[in-house]
Image (cartoon, helix red, strand yellow):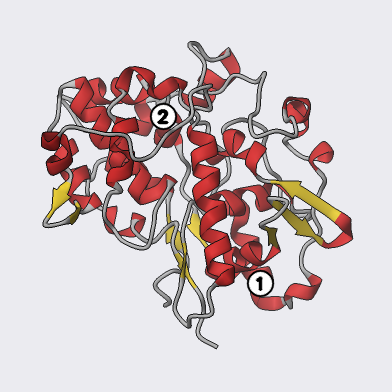
């Protein structure tokens, strides 16, 4: 099987970042406090390489839209907030901020950023809020939200990650979108035989499943979408990819006819989405709080060690151009 095909996402993320007793509840509390609890509620999802590369091809780097047959164009940037449920506050995430030598060296191995697996492993034993949150952010950025072509953390994010008190007020959604769009643009410009798509490509699959018209596909409402969309909902896509040429792919709904209709008016043409409270507010609405909640059942289902399936995460958001 291809390294990048059918890779499980949700269980790996939860097993990596949901920490077991006695420090487990305390660390989950830290994650909630900084506004990233939606990551812990992510449903299991298997990436399909062919579908994802097709979606990458459908993405217009100039308009930042997925362009489908029938003249339907879907803006991706304003949907990131509703897919991921992470903070999209008023503070811009700035890369390359100065940090002290001690912190920089803590995330350095030789002359490069430390391996993300090692950072996540060390995170599991941290019980103090600030160092735990820094480690969490560095690991989740490198592994899922803003991955590059390596498995190392990007130390350019350290200056932002260390501002633990402001993490919930930062615009992480725009950062994730920027990294994904740049990754797609670099991929399309490259004429190399082997080149990876950098960025959180999981977003594209979730959006497509939410919009696809198919008689057997029933997509429930609720936000964030990563806590709703599962492999079972999207399994038809891989079968369709095999059975149909991309020229006759599934039709899609416009946003007004989709699960995004209730929040459509909260998506301005600019770079930010206002009005709907996700994890960027001081307190979530009851409906969204329910979506983000981590139940006892969720916790009890995570019986494996924290790093049991971390290896799967390293390839979730990095797809490689197929060999002709």
| Residue 38 against residue 302 in the figure, above or below | above
Discs 1/2, front = 2
Kindly state the secondary structure of the residue where label 1 is placed.
helix
Q: Residue at x 46, y 48 (%)?
A: 44
Q: Residue at x 55, y 88 (%)?
A: 324
Q: Which residue is mark 2?
A: 36
- Tell me whether circle 1 and circle 2 mark residues in contact (CB < 8 Å): no
Q: Position of residue 212 (x, y in %)?
A: 74, 53
Does the rendering let one see residue 187?
Answer: yes
Name the foreground residue: 313 vs 238: 313
Mark 2 neighbour class, 10 Å CA radius: few under 14, some 14 to 19, many 20 or more: many
Mark 1 neighbour class, 10 Å CA radius: few under 14, some 14 to 19, many 20 or more: some
Of marks 1 and 2, which one's residue comes earlier in the chain? 2
| Residue 225 against residue 25 in the figure, above or below | below
Quarter where residue 222 is shown? top right
Q: Position of residue 34 (x, y in %)?
A: 37, 22
Q: Quadrant of the N terminus?
A: bottom left
Kindly state the secondary structure of the residue where label 2 is placed.
loop
Does the rendering let one see residue 231?
Answer: no
Q: Position of residue 195 (x, y in %)?
A: 46, 73
| Residue 305 against residue 216 in the figure, above or below | above
Side (left or right) of 201 relative to 63? left
Residue 228, disc: none
Instruction: Kindly give the residue lying farthest to the right in the view shown.
Output: 70
Q: Which residue is mark 1?
A: 241
Name the foreground residue: 294 vs 271: 271
Q: Position of residue 31 (x, y in %)?
A: 33, 26
| Residue 299 against residue 45 in the figure, above or below | above
């Amino acid at each position: 099987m291809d390294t990048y095909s059918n890779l499980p996402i949700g269980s790996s993320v939860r097993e990596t970042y949901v920490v077991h007793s006695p420090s487990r509840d305390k660390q989950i509390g830290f994650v909630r406090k900084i506004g990233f609890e939606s990551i812990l509620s992510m449903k299991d999802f298997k990436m399909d390489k062919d579908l994802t590369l097709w979606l990458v091809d459908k993405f217009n780097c100039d308009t930042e839209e997925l362009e489908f047959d029938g003249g339907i164009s879907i803006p991706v940037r304003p949907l990131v907030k509703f897919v991921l449920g992470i903070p999209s506050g008023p503070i811009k995430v700035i890369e390359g901020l100065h940090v002290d030598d001690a912190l920089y060296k803590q995330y350095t191995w030789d002359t490069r950023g430390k391996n993300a697996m090692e950072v996540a492993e060390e995170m599991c034993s941290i019980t103090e809020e600030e160092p735990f949150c820094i480690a969490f952010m560095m690991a989740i950025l490198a592994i899922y939200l803003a991955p590059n072509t390596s498995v190392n953390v990007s130390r350019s994010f350290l200056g932002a990650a260390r501002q633990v008190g402001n993490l919930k007020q930062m615009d992480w959604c725009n950062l994730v979108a920027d990294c994904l769009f740049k990754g797609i643009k670099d991929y399309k410009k490259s004429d190399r035989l082997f080149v990876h798509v950098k960025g959180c490509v999981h977003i594209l699959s979730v959006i497509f499943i939410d919009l696809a018209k198919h008689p057997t596909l029933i997509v429930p409402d609720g936000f964030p979408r990563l806590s709703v969309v599962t492999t079972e909902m999207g399994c038809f896509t891989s079968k369709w990819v095999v059975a149909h040429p991309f020229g006759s792919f599934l039709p899609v709904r416009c946003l007004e006819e989709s699960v995004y209709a209730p929040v459509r008016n909260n998506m301005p043409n600019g770079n930010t989405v206002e009005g709907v409270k996700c994890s960027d507010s001081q307190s979530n609405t009851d409906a969204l709080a329910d979506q983000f909640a981590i139940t006892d059942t969720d916790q009890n289902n995570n019986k494996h060690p924290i790093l049991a399936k971390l290896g799967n995460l390293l390839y979730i958001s990095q797809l490689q151009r197929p060999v002709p």
